[in-house]
Image: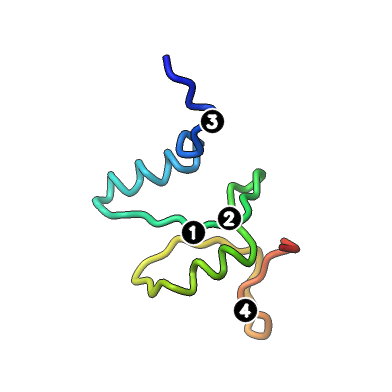
Amino acid sequence: MSDDSRNPLSDPIFRRISRLADAMGVRAYVVGGLPKPGTEAIVGGVALEGLQGYHFTKAFLGANGVTVKEGVTTPDTE
């Protein structure tokens, strides 16, 4: 039996992303950034920089708030 505990791709979020992409017949890209354990979100400046290079037709994103003035917001300090 192999020890997958050190393999970041064995993490549940990556397995779910992989299974969903396979089921839909699409490729899934995951940007780098700071993982947030409680929500499994990837946050921070590195994540924002990573997103700037893409032009999406479809994306699954999460946010804590959306307003006309502030746009999409989160309480994360990163």
Residue type of the residue flagged with mark 1: Val
In space, the residues marked 3 and 2 are separated at their CA atoms by 19 Å
User: Residue beneath label 3, please?
Assistant: 6
Residue for point 53% across, 27% down: 5
How many neighbours does mark 4 have within 10 angstroms: few (below 14), some (14-19), or many (20 or more)? few
Q: Nearer the viewer, mark 3 or mark 4?
A: 3
How many neighbours does mark 3 have within 10 angstroms: few (below 14), some (14-19), or many (20 or more)? few
How many neighbours does mark 2 have within 10 angstroms: few (below 14), some (14-19), or many (20 or more)? some
Which badge, 1 or 4, is on the more N-terminal residue? Answer: 1
User: Residue beneath label 4, please?
Assistant: 71
Total number of numbered discs in the rendering:
4
Q: Nearer the viewer, residue 40 or 35?
A: 35
Q: Is the C-beta separation of discs 1 and 4 under 8 Å? A: no
Secondary structure, mark 2, is strand
Q: Nearer the viewer, mark 4 or mark 2?
A: 2
Q: Nearer the viewer, mark 3 or mark 1?
A: 3
